[in-house]
Amino acid sequence: MRFIKSTLDKVKIIAGNNKYLKTFNPVINAMDEFFFGTDKVTTLPHIVDNMDIKRLMSLVIIALLPVTIASIYFWGLRVLLVIMVSYAFGGLIEVCFAVFRKKEIHEGFLVTGLIFPLILPPGVPLWVVAVGVMFGVIFGKEVFGGTGRNIFNPAIVGRVFLTIAFPNIMTMNWQMPFNKGLGGFIHFQNIVDAVTRATPLVMLKNQGVITPYMDLLFGQSAGCIGETFRVGIIAGGLFLIVMRIVDWRLPLAYLATVVIFPYFSNHLIHTQFALGGFQLLSGGLLLGAFFMATDPVTSPFTKPGRWIAGFLLGFLTVLIRGLSGYVEGVMFSILLINAFTPLIDTMLLKIRYKKK
Amino acid sequence: MLKPARTFRGGYRFKNFNGQARPVIVENQIPALVTIPLKQGFGTELKSLVKKGDTVFAGQTIARDDSVVSSPIHSSVNGVVEDVKRMNYFKRQTAMVIIRTTNTSKEIPRLEGCSVEWARLSNEKIEELIYLSGVSSLDREGIPTRFKSSIIPTEEVKHLIVHGIGSEPYNISLDLLLKDKNLLNFLEGVKILKRIMPNSKVHLSLNAKKKSIIEQVTKLTSQLEWLDIYPLEPKYPQGYDEMLVPTILNQNFPYGYSAANIGVVILNIQAVLGVYEAVCEGKPFIERIIAICGLSIKDNIHIKVRVGTSLKDILAERIKTESPARVILNSLLTGFQLNDINLPIDRTFSHIIAIPEKREREFLSFMRPGKTRDSYTRAFLAEMLPWVKRAPDTNKHGEERPCISCGFCERACPVKIIPHLLAKYVQRSLIDETIMNYGIFNCIECGLCSYVCPSKISLMNIIKDGQSKLTMQGCDSTQCILPYFNLKGIEEYRGVTKL
């Protein structure tokens, strides 16, 4: 602790005297605040909550840890490299903008930097990760004015960009996960089994094969890095809900719609959608519902708005999965509903505060 | 009659704070010098009836004016008036009478005509006793009597709410206030109040967690059909008038006005005990029970202290000197910070809180498990260890960040406004009728939004700022209230609060 303190103090002095290094003050301050907290005191009220954004974001990362560790087991140590690339390049953009704007660095990026690699295919080339995360942070967040002002979830923006720009890379790199012994913890990558495998959703669409639910739950299927270990995702999501960091309404509405809607439409209009249970456990639905659709900045803040957004998300996801040329609909539906969020909130406020 | 437990939406229950005052009472010695403000509690400031050099006795009326809304003020010691001068007292210049004690006898002369058999006294006499004792200036509306101590006459009181909930982080002990004989005295006090406010229905709201007190009160009052008992969840800010009226009476509150304007009088337990002591024992209200709370106090107890005693006399021996402390009056969320230790205490004091002023930085603060940390979220170890007491301090616990619309403030807000939305409008200077429509004038300044905000935004201050800017533009809070309520005594209320 003393060592870090003295180093930071020295760096501060050096940076304070150097004209060029001065521009990096936001970085130094961010480090300082990260390690030593604040010395500011309250005015009124005299006490404030102990929760701050740093802890809030760390808790989201803790909730993602089971999934991250499992993904290393399934896809090999290369996952760590992918995460590091994502953090490095995303962080670079964040620092550039902070320096450029002369503002402090915000913690929100810590979550984006981890979620983004989790929604990429395991065999994704590293340069694609770098391009994607940079695009996501710039066009998903910074152009709108930084944390708290973005309309779209940065990770989703990056992912959608990659899907459209590099369709081959993003749809062909599926592998089968390790499932024996120490698995990915001692391998760099699954080369032996690197045959291109189809994800459960593709297998359903092309061959009508339904992957067993147990395989889906415990990660024995092809898919994105972080979306296959669904038990871990559910545990992480419930952890956040219990901690009161995430509101339960949106995920509940989303997941319930995905389960119920195919059932109803199959009965009423005879369109063949996959069964609700399979829809629920396939693709990136759980990761999206618990960790991305609930991003407080980009989801409605009114309570009825959360129900509505959840319902629309479920509806769109099932429709895109069932009727469009794409196999996965979670990402597009979250992006679309993000765009609708301000509208939903404004409408609901108008109803709630109708002039008497 | 015992009613089912009630509560309201929003709010937050402060649990397990370390430094709660033990239910022990110690009588403070009579101070050598008292400074008595001539405005105490509800009422306008009075002119002194005594001048420099006069000899006064404890309980002597030193200020009284029956022509304005006010209650008499007494000397609290036997002594000589040393000076009458204006001093800065809670951000306003207030006249003070300074008295040097000459005789430290604890005797207080009784008011004339008091009687334990109060039922035999006439209404006029009871009201006079209440008025003369000064008890009628307590709480936000005072107690109405025929001597203009409140803003409405006694016949117009439709509801009388007596509350002992304790929803703040630190509370005066209900067990202590209603111990043994005090409980009976308290109920007598309630009956006296019912007698002088004959058209009222009495609502007694108590902390739902204090089962034994509720049980006792229910047993003792089973005969009274005009009295209802409501166990209320001790969720902050339940003790506010603005929350008691909707929870108990299912009635809207005219935000920005007083409950008396809609014919409701709200009193706390100490005021009712004061009524009993005035009518039955003839005691002028010159002593106050104060809870001394917080971690910077050596021994957290209650003290009985004469009005006018300076804070120095109370705190000098009791406060810890190792580390800097912040001394706060009455409430950790909304209370005044008491910087000047020479200030006197008055009738309205009920808690003096001292918590550590924590400016030291903490290594990796946000990663700590937080065994003693209180939070609206459940993300600290304290939530899982109900037996561990929580230690509040004045540190901000984090840097200010942009709003992420997490919605904590909206969930915690007791009056159903959306603080972060209002704050965004105010910060972008979009000040017009929209934010009035969003209910900016409904804010009761409980401070809960600022408390729960993880981005450390001072929402309450921003909203207050927005209110004053909006008022400057000509939008008045009266526009939201007057068309919907039939308010009484508005002019009188203005007269008291604008001074």
Image: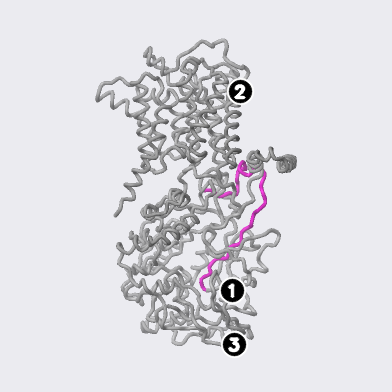
For the residues labelled 2 and 3, say whether their Cβ atoms are less than 8 Å apart: no
Q: Is residue A175 visible?
A: yes
The numbered mark at residue B52 is 3
Which is more toward the observer, B221 or A165? A165
The C terminus of chain A lies in quadrant = bottom left
Q: What residue sits right under mark 2 in the picture?
A: A81
Q: Separation of disc 2 and disc 1 at Cα?
A: 66 Å
Chain under disc 3: B
Locate residue B186: give its quadrant: bottom left
Task: Decide which of tag 1 and tag 3 comes sooner along the chain.
Answer: 3
Of the residues shown, which amino acid type is indicated by label 2?
Leu
Residues A116 and A163: in front is A163
Q: Position of residue A281 (x, y in %)?
A: 42, 24
Q: Position of residue B388 (x, y in %)?
A: 59, 50
- The amino acid sitting under disc 3 is Lys
Say which chain tag 1 marks: B
Q: Quadrant of residue A13?
A: top right
Could you tell me which secondary element the residue under label 3 belongs to?
Answer: loop
Please name the residue shown 47% across and 79% down the image: B134
Q: Which residues are magenta?
A: B347-375
Vertical arrangement, residue B200 with respect to residue A158, above or below: below
**In front: mark 2 or mark 1?**
2
Kind of element beneath mark 1: loop
Q: CA distance from mark 1 to mark 3?
A: 19 Å
Please tell me how crowded label 3 is: few (under 14), some (14-19), or many (20+) other residues with Cα within 10 Å. Answer: some
Secondary structure mostly taken by the magenta-highlighted segment of the chain: loop
Is residue A319 highlighted in magenta?
A: no
Q: Which residue does the numbered mark 1 point to in the structure image?
A: B344
Residue at the image position 59 percent from the left and 89 percent from the top:
B55
**SS at circle 2:** helix
**Is residue B214 visible from the viewing direction of this image?**
no
The answer to whether residue B358 is magenta is yes
